[in-house]
Image (spheres, rainbow, N blue to C red):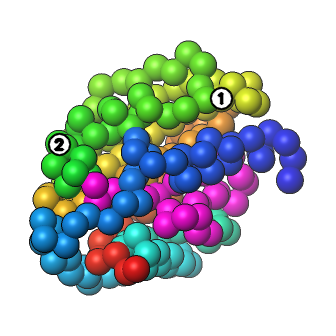
Amino acid sequence: MPPRRLAILLPVLACATAAGGCGDDEPAPVSTTPQERADRRGPLPRGWTRVVNRRAGFSLGIPPGWKARGARGATLVRSGDRLLAVSIAADRSADGRDLPADVYVRRTANSLEGYRALRVGRPQPLRGARYPGSTVSARGVFARTSLRQAIRVTALRRRGRVTFTLIFFRTARAPAARYRAATRGMVRTFRAGPAEP
């Protein structure tokens, strides 16, 4: 894999394996968490593949040619050209159950490690998703590789139960419009379910 394409995955891997701001893998105490149920999976666009993460309790569709793999309860998705990567995780900690989505996305974006000159925008309400949520854009330079990235943190909430985060990392030179339909489709096809041990 070319070094600049590999570089886009480094912050995704760091985010997927970190606790806290990128989605905590710590299970919630049974006595305080309402029972979760699996939502019915909706149809996928033609040619898309459904990715299921039973440990974290979610599924979503990815476009043709995109690849997904698991890492410590998170799912990592990479575009076919390897210029965009996505970290998807579930947070069932107290923050994930209780924080408003706009607060959650801003905290998550500000907690991304390894960036120079990280600039985080204002959270916006999420539209077109099955679950209520919020999204925020950020930009920064990943220090390890000097790669300039455009980042979008999206939070989907099951109030009182869990917050799911989809963090999109895009090489800043790649136009956002190239991935717009794909990223919106991933959010639209996202479905929640109970986490399995």
Instruction: Name the residue carrying label 2.
Output: 100
Residue 45 painted magenta:
no
Question: Dot 1, crowdedness within 10 Å: few (<14), some or many (≥20)?
Answer: many
Q: Which amino acid type is marked by label 1?
A: Phe
Q: Which amino acid type is marked by label 2?
A: Pro
Are dots 2 and 1 in contact, CB under 8 Å? no
Mark nearer the N terminus (2 vs 1): 2
x and y, in percent, of residue 47 in the image = 56, 78
Residue 91 painted magenta:
yes
Q: Residue at x 62, y 51 (%)?
A: 13
Q: Residue at x 19, y 43 (%)?
A: 99
Instruction: Name the residue carrying label 1.
Output: 142
x and y, in percent, of residue 89 in the image = 43, 59
Q: Quadrant of residue 175?
A: top right
Q: Which residues are magenta?
A: 69-93
Q: Which mark is residue 40?
A: none
Q: Please, is residue 98 above or below residue 119 in the view?
A: below
Work out which quarter of the rendered image holds the C terminus and state it. bottom left
Q: Residue at x 40, y 41 (%)?
A: 21
Which element carries disc 1, helix, strand or loop? Answer: strand
Which element carries disc 2, helix, strand or loop? Answer: loop
